[in-house]
Amino acid sequence: MAHQLLQTEIEKETDKILGCIHCGLCLPACPTYLQLGNENDSPRGRIYLMRSVAEGRLDASSETFNRHIDLCLGCRACETACPAGVHYGHLLEAARQTQMEVASNKSQGFHKKMLGLALRKVFPFPERLGIVFTFLKFVRSNPLTRWVLSSGLIRKISRQADFALSLLMTTRPKNNPHLTFHRGQNLIKTPASGNPNTRNVTVFTGCVMEGLFKHTNDATSRVLAVNDCSLSEVKTQVCCGALHAHAGDLETARSLARKNIDAFDEFLGSGATAQNLPTIIINAAGCGALLKDYGNLLKDDPLYADRATRFGSQVKDVTEFLIQREVRRGAEIDQTVTYDAPCHLYHAQKVQTAPQQLLSTINGLNYVQLEGMQDCCGGAGIYNLSEPEMSEAILSDKIARVKATGARILTTANPGCHMQLGAGLRMFDVDCHVAHVVELLDESYRRAGYYKSRIEITKPEKEEIQITKQTK
């Protein structure tokens, strides 16, 4: 029955849920409750609705259940606030899978239909995904697109379409005037082979990151190599499944998780020691949260449960990984900077200070603390398109706080947040540009002369970074 999945998931959390004293500490942490003041749009209220469905007291196809679950951003700020330790994110995924099971095609909105189609027919297939991203990159690089946006023509026709196009345009590599775009640059000097301080890493490239933010992936690799890392490349990796899990398509998420565990198996076992475990580096908060949670996702799979737990334990966000040791200093960057924490980095992964610590290693930066930097920006996957009014209300509060810092660069660590914030800065006409935290460190290294252009090199040199390919 439709309620059985929720019933099973609720039972796993029974002790913690029953331990809740309804203290309400989650309410001021919830973006939708703060906007609407409706108990049903709070974590406490939504859990009550889930229990009602699980116990058969409420129909899973009812408007009451679906509307309040749909309005949830899945930011998981409630988990940080909750003294009982309720895993709300797991419950929400189960609720959304229940929605998928009972929803007819007619009852789903346009955005849900398109998302479901993309998740099932595009994201699991790298070739199809590549075609989509090739088209999107063509659109964003087309001068006509920039002209149409700057003319205000689309905004006059559809504010939502204008915002959607702005989301795409924020991903352009040359979009930030404070950073120098450079591709394919090598290190002047990299760790010597056999150096005991060298760490064996690989970058989980992701689908959106590699498709629209490849410049950030490249910057991540360069920064890691400067900081005594030997990089390997795992060619057979696929989409992490985060979008699927968040949308309730847990079976596809599990299928993708198994493929990734198989793909990275050889790398994770290569040269592993207790002091130096091979590490999967992630620079996208949403992806990282699920990759680290593969153990929970596959806990009922006897063939993958243990491997999934090991996999998750060897995943690190690039910021938390780098600050484990002294970070190499680069040149000065004289800019005022602030930082907005992605929800799935701050609340889901509990990486709460590493990005600011990394920024503090860059000489010359004037770092200004952003009020409410841990609060959601309203992006949440395609929430900004499916729930535009709520998303804009949350975003407007965030952009007002960013403006108050006087920062010229707004750093973050997740592609969805990057796009949402970049589009918001344009919408509200704030003179500030978005960058990934690691891109600023990469820029300081470029200014320090750590890199040289690949076009200057005619033969592989011993001191250059060596990338070994792991295929399976």
Image (spheres, grey):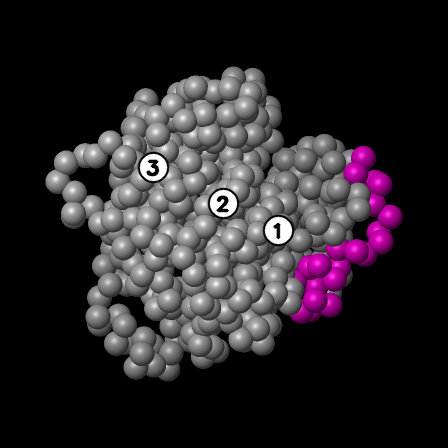
Residue type at numbered disc 3: Thr
Residue 91 spot, x, y in % from top left:
66, 42
Query: Which residue occupies 50% across, 69% down?
Result: 336
Question: Which residue is painted at 58% across and 76% down in the image?
Answer: 404
How crowded pointer 2 is (Cα within 10 Å; few <14, some 14-19, many 20+) is rated as some
Q: Secondary structure at mark 3?
A: loop
- The residues bearing labels 1 and 3 have C-alpha atoms spaced at a distance of 28 Å
Residue under pointer 3: 190
Label 1 Cα neighbours within 10 Å, binned few <14 / some 14-19 / many ≥20: few
Residue depicted at x 48% and y 64%: 364
Residue in the foreground of this view, choosing between 405 and 464: 464
Q: Earlier in the sequence, mark 1 or mark 3?
A: 3
Q: CA distance from mark 2 to mark 3?
A: 14 Å
Q: Secondary structure at mark 1?
A: loop
Query: Can you give x and y, in whole percent of width and height, for residue 456 in the image?
Result: 16, 47
Q: What's the amino acid at mark 2?
A: Val
Residues tagged 2 and 3 counted as in contact (Cβ below 8 A)? no
Specify the farthest residue to the top.
303
| Residue range corresponding to the magenta coloring | 15-37
Residue 327: mark in rendering: 2
Q: Is residue 113 visible?
A: no
Q: Is residue 388 left or right of residue 448?
A: right
Q: What quarter of the picture does the C terminus occupy?
A: top left
Q: SS class of the residue under badge 2?
A: loop
Q: Which residue is mark 1?
A: 353
